[in-house]
Image (cartoon, grey):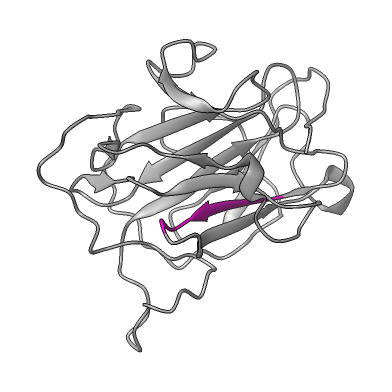
Amino acid sequence: MSGSGGAGGLGGSGGNAMKDASADQGNVGGSVVVPDATTPDTGAPDHGDAEPPDVGSDGPPPCGLVLNEIKGIGGGDDWVELLNTCQTPFVLDGFALTQASGDFGPPDMAASLTFPASTTLDGGAYLFVLAQQATIGGPVATCAGLAATCFNVTWGISSSAGERVYILNPSHTVYQQVDYLAPTSGGPASGQTLSRAANGTYQNATPTPNMPNGI
């Protein structure tokens, strides 16, 4: 869905909280795409709000890949920031990022960005996906000054109607989903993003690209 929104000043934090079951590890890093990594850590994914068939009775593992920050209103392009909350690399081979079909429907597979082989995110590092671009793919080095490298998608975050954003497993099952709400429903105002707090909830906050969220 195409995003919208005008320019505006930075805002404070607010409601729009959604629980994510992961636990942050406290380490941070830059947006890193490392090819040909030899020490992947795919055994500790964070399944967030999804209910994939491989989650055992003990619940989701304590760290993994999460939707960390979503920008869908205000000046400039929309973007999505992913974070590896583990201390070891996370291999994204075959994982995908996409919007919902409609506002909050099932994943839109035709619009999905599938991360190519050897795409690895270092422990504590961020990965940027720049929205509203001409093509889907990457990595590229033109990232609106937000990161050294990023990926592109053609869709945007709808600030007028709201938007569900998905991370999908390589099998196309849901790994995590987060609902970005319209401002009229408690979502971010201009100058805010939907940001993940250390306790796994999502709140409206001042944008912090490539840095720990300020909540």
| Residue 192, x across and y down, in percent | 68, 33
x%, y% of residue 38?
10, 42
The part of the chain drawn in magenta is 164-170
Residue at the spot 79% in from the left edge and 32% down from the top edge: 2
Q: Is residue 213 visible?
A: no
Using the image, determine if residue 45 lies above or below residue 151: below
Q: Is residue 131 above or below residue 176?
A: above
Assign the magenta stretch its main secondary structure.
strand
The structure residue drawn at horizontal position 43% and vertical position 66%, both measured from the top left corner, is: 47
**Residue at the farthest bottom position:** 57
Tag count in the figure?
0
Look at the image and tell me in which quarter the N terminus lies.
top right
Can you name the residue that lies furthest to the left here? 38
Residue 127 locus on image (x, y percent) = 40, 33
Q: Is residue 174 magenta?
A: no
- The residue under the point 86% across, 46% down is 161
The image position of residue 66, as x and y in percent, is 44, 51
Q: Is residue 127 left or right of residue 76?
A: left
Foreground: 93 or 31? 93
Q: Residue at x 81, y 52 (%)?
A: 102
Asked whether, in this view, residue 156 is left or right of residue 146, the answer is right
Q: Is residue 214 left or right of residue 123?
A: right
Q: Per the image, is 165 magenta?
A: yes
- In the displayed structure, does residue 178 sit left or right of residue 156? left
Residue 28 visible in rendering: yes
Picture quadrant where residue 5 is located: top right
Please say if 159 is above or below 137: below
